[in-house]
Image: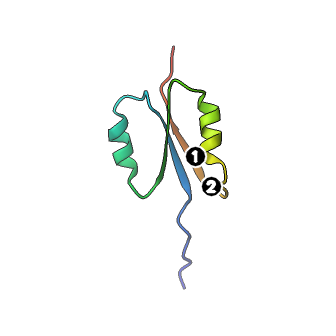
Amino acid sequence: MPVTQAPRKQVYVFDSGVPELQTLIDAVGADQKIIILNTGSDGVLQLADALAGESNLDAIHIFSHGWV
């Protein structure tokens, strides 16, 4: 008998300053939890607030830009 696995509980976090943001969001899919961080505020605090109450996450995917 095949073992049925529960769907993975994942969160996708995007920095609002990422180029092609809407394209990335569309690729993730509407059935996923998506968090968009405001580039003008503390990202760590925003992430902590957004994840408050969440538990048993399998993955947090963070999409951001970097500065050299």
Q: Check if mark 2's residue and mark 1's residue have beta carbons within 8 Å.
A: yes
10 Å crowding of disc 2: few (<14), some (14-19), many (20+): few
When the figure is inspected, residue 5 is found, relative to residue 39, above or below; the finding is below
Q: Residue at x 38, y 55 (%)?
A: 30
Q: Provide residue 25's location: percent of width, then percent of height.
A: 38, 44
Residue holding disc 2: 57
Three-letter amino acid code at the position of disc 2: Leu
Quarter of the image where one finds residue 50: top right
For the residue pair 3 and 56, the one nearer the viewer reads as: 56
Residue 27, percent from left and from top:
35, 47
Q: Residue at x 56, y 71 (%)?
A: 5
Q: Position of residue 20 (x, y in %)?
A: 33, 33
Visual colour scheme: rainbow
**Residue 68 image label:** none
- Separation of disc 2 and disc 1 at Cα? 7 Å
Q: Which residue is mark 1?
A: 60
**Is disc 1 placed on a helix, strand or loop?**
strand
**Which of these two is toward me, 17 or 46?**
46
